[in-house]
Image (cartoon, rainbow, N blue to C red):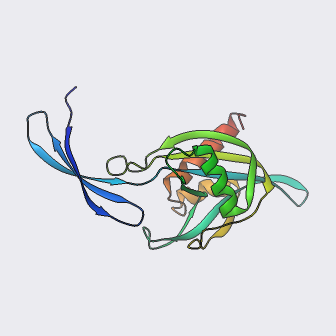
């Protein structure tokens, strides 16, 4: 199969969190093209599912974080997530740390779903997605720049929030759909 070939990569800009590179690519016919490439640390996200009793009936609630995101110019609802502390950090450890730091909950059961690159044509950031159940209390320990509100939704409310464009974060959407699929199949 014919494809592009990377000829050169030059750092164009180094920001607080990301590095932007200019890639020089060569087509099979020899023509040279320029591409942008953004590097960021990998990370993990985790959908926490809590069992609660309301009016004597046990039900499930998904726990989300709502926080300001400059990319959407306002508040965003998403699953707890964050970057690895160092490149070799296990994705599972990252997910568990972020769950406790952002929500104060620690899942006793962890279900791996998948890894994604949200914008594969531009970014290299890989995010592992997990579902955490059987929650126990931990301790919130948010970063100084994290201003987070916890939001609880039933699985049905979360699905509707996706369809209503209230949840637009890709890792969160994948986690919601995966949970509902696994639950329907009796696998979780």
Q: Residue at x 62, y 39 (%)?
A: 112
Q: Residue at x 72, y 51 (%)?
A: 49
Q: Relative to residue 136, is residue 163 drawn left or right?
A: left
Q: Residue at x 8, y 41 (%)?
A: 31
73 vs 93: above or below: below
Residue 80 x, y percent position in the rendering: 61, 58
Residue 133 x, y percent position in the rendering: 74, 47
143 vs 133: above or below: below
> Which of the two residues, 19 or 71, is positioned nearer the viewer here?
19
Which quadrant of the figure contains the C terminus?
Answer: top right
113 vs 124: above or below: above
Report which quarter residue 82 is drawn in. bottom right
> Which of the two residues, 130 or 179, is positioned nearer the viewer here?
130
Report which quarter residue 104 is drawn in. bottom right
What number of labels is visible?
0
Considering every residue shown, the one lying at the far right of the view is 56
Residue 35 x, y percent position in the rendering: 22, 51
> Which of the two residues, 51 or 101, is positioned nearer the viewer here?
101
Considering every residue shown, the one lying at the far left of the view is 30
Q: Relative to residue 73, is residue 138 drawn left or right?
A: right
142 vs 49: above or below: below
Which quadrant of the figure contains the N terminus?
Answer: top left
Report which quarter residue 64 is drawn in. bottom right
């Amino acid at each position: 199969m014919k494809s592009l070939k990377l000829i050169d990569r030059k750092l164009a800009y180094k920001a607080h969190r990301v590095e932007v590179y200019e890639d020089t690519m060569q087509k099979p016919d020899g023509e040279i093209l320029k591409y942008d490439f953004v590097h960021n640390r990998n990370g993990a996200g985790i959908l926490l599912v809590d069992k609660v009793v309301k009016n004597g009936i046990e039900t499930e609630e998904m726990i989300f974080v709502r926080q300001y995101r400059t990319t959407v110019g306002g508040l965003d609802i998403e699953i707890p997530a964050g970057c690895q502390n160092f490149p070799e950090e296990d994705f599972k450890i990252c997910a568990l740390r972020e769950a406790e730091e952002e929500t104060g909950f620690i899942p006793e059961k962890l279900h791996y779903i998948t890894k994604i690159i949200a914008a594969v044509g531009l970014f290299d950031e890989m995010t592992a997605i997990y579902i955490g159940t059987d929650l126990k209390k931990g301790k919130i320990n948010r970063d100084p720049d994290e201003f987070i509100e916890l939001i609880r939704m039933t699985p049905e409310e979360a699905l509707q929030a996706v369809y209503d464009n209230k949840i637009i974060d890709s890792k969160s959407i994948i986690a919601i759909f995966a949970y509902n699929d696994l639950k329907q199949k009796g696998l979780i």
